[in-house]
Image (spheres, rainbow, N blue to C red):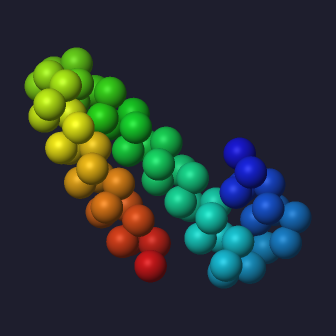
Amino acid sequence: GAGSAWYHLDPSNASLFWDRLAMCIAFAGALGALAGERLGDRAARRWLGGWLLLGASALA
């Protein structure tokens, strides 16, 4: 994605954040989809929000 391209064009801590954030969002979406299949839509939305917050806070 765009974050990864930016990181590889100019590797730095700031661009690494955007590279990892894009991956975090993608992985949270995949986990949310799995939760939706197993737990239902309402629970999946709660889990997705939690995973997004956890992933973003891990990058800080």
Q: Is residue 23 above or below residue 17?
A: above
Q: Classify residue 15 as left or right of residue 20.
A: right
The quarter of the rendered structure image containing the N terminus is top right
Location of residue 22 in the rendering, given as x and y in whole percent from the top left corner: 57, 53
- Residue lying furthest top: 37
- So how many labels did they put on this image? 0
The quarter of the rendered structure image containing the C terminus is bottom left
Location of residue 41 in the rendering, given as x and y in whole percent from the top left corner: 19, 25
Q: Is residue 58 above or below residue 38?
A: below
Write the residue at 59% across / 70% down. 17
Location of residue 21 in the rendering, given as x and y in whole percent from the top left corner: 53, 60
Q: Find residue 57 and report its image quarter.
A: bottom left
**Foreground of the two, 59 or 41:** 41
Q: Find residue 13 and report its image quarter.
A: bottom right
Write the residue at 70% across / 71% down. 15
**Foreground of the two, 30 or 43:** 43
Q: Classify residue 31 as left or right of residue 1.
A: left
Q: Classify residue 55 as left or right of residue 3.
A: left
Q: Is residue 44 above or below residue 52?
A: above
Write the residue at 79% across / 73% down. 11
Location of residue 36 in the rendering, given as x and y in whole percent from the top left corner: 23, 25
- Residue lying furthest right: 9
Q: Is residue 50 above or below residue 11?
A: above
Q: Find residue 43 and report its image quarter.
A: top left
